[in-house]
Amino acid sequence: MIRLSFLSALFAFAGTQLSMAAGNDNARVPVLLELFTSEGCSSCPPADRLLQEFDRNQPVANANLIVLSEHVDYWDRLGWKDPFSSPQYTARQQDYAGRYSREGAYTPQLVVDGRYALVGSDSREANAAIQKAAREQKVAIALSNVARDGKQVKARVEVPASADLKKRSAVLYVALADNRAESQVARGENAGRSLAHVAVTRVLKEAGTIDLASASSKEILLTVPAGAGANGLRLVAFLEDSSSGHVLGVAAQKL
């Protein structure tokens, strides 16, 4: 009986520790990191590497870092056309620049939760911004029924009612991103270099406006672009405040 009681106590203690560990994981606040970058920019590779570190190592204790690389196209005319670039990401960066940057759009630029903009390779400032963003109230959005069928990705995005945000509406965005991508750059400022990227955005779509006063659910259908997904994909969904541009909630799942 003494041995059995000891083992029971040991298992109970182990279960408690596992529950605490799970609770600690759940306590991490999702924070969206958007890196505006370009393969034509010689200052960008250090920022690309920092984003990979944030994604892989999750170094901020209270934050779950969800990352997206958004390749702008204004470097494309300067010797190397970035294969991942899009005018859509340039326009998104310019919208942020109108809010946060006196210098206008530049690369590399990191935007944290739509709230803080900084030089994308500045790890100290990035950590400070992440810690501030992780203290903000967030909507606990969730992804379910995520599946890929050939060139189609389906998912359900579920948004709970947020009592403290009754007067707010938010725009729901969904993104498909390559888990990783590499390029051999032949021309431009990075000529001769092999560049690696993480979470390269291939699709970014506005999926509607959400009334945060009540729970809602949206079915999502996205088409995987040609050439995307060779190294796996991830789906990212986030809510953006329609007036401030702040990210109110974000979730991600690898396919």
Image (tube, helix red, strand yellow):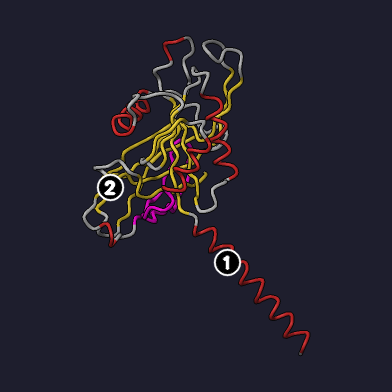
Q: Secondary structure at mark 2?
A: strand
The answer to whether any part of residue 70 appears in the image is: no
Q: Amino acid at mark 2?
A: Ala
Image height of 102 relative to 254, above or below:
above
Q: Amino acid at mark 1?
A: Met
How crowded pointer 1 is (Cα within 10 Å; few <14, some 14-19, many 20+) is rated as few
Look at 74% across and 82% down and name the residue there.
Answer: 6
- Neighbour class for label 2 at 10 Å: few (<14), some, many (≥20)? many
Q: Which residue is mark 1?
A: 20
The reply to whether dot 2 and dot 1 touch (C-beta < 8 Å) is no
- 115 horizontally vs 37: left or right: left
Alpha carbon distance from label 2 to label 1: 33 Å
Q: Is residue 110 visible?
A: yes
Q: Is residue 211 left or right of residue 56?
A: left
For image coordinates 46% across by 48% down, the residue present is: 131
Disc ID at residue 108: none
Q: Write down the residue under mark 2.
A: 170
User: Over which residues does the magenta segment extend?
Assistant: 133-159
- Residue 128 against residue 25 in the figure, above or below: above
Q: Earlier in the sequence, mark 2 or mark 1?
A: 1
- Residue 82 place in picture, x, y as percent: 47, 19
Say which quadrant the N terminus sits in: bottom right
Q: Position of residue 231 (x, y in %)?
A: 57, 34
Residue at 60 percent of width and 44 percent of height: 57
Circle 2 or circle 1, nearest the eye: 1
In this rendering, position of residue 212 left or right of residue 82? left
Q: Residue furthest right?
A: 3
Quadrant location of residue 118?
A: top left
Q: Confirm whether the magenta stretch covers residue 41.
A: no
Residue projecting furthest to the bottom: 1
Q: Please state the horizontal and vertical placement of residue 20, each as a whole percent of the image.
A: 57, 66
Taking depth in this image into account, of 142 and 54 the one nearest to the observer is 54
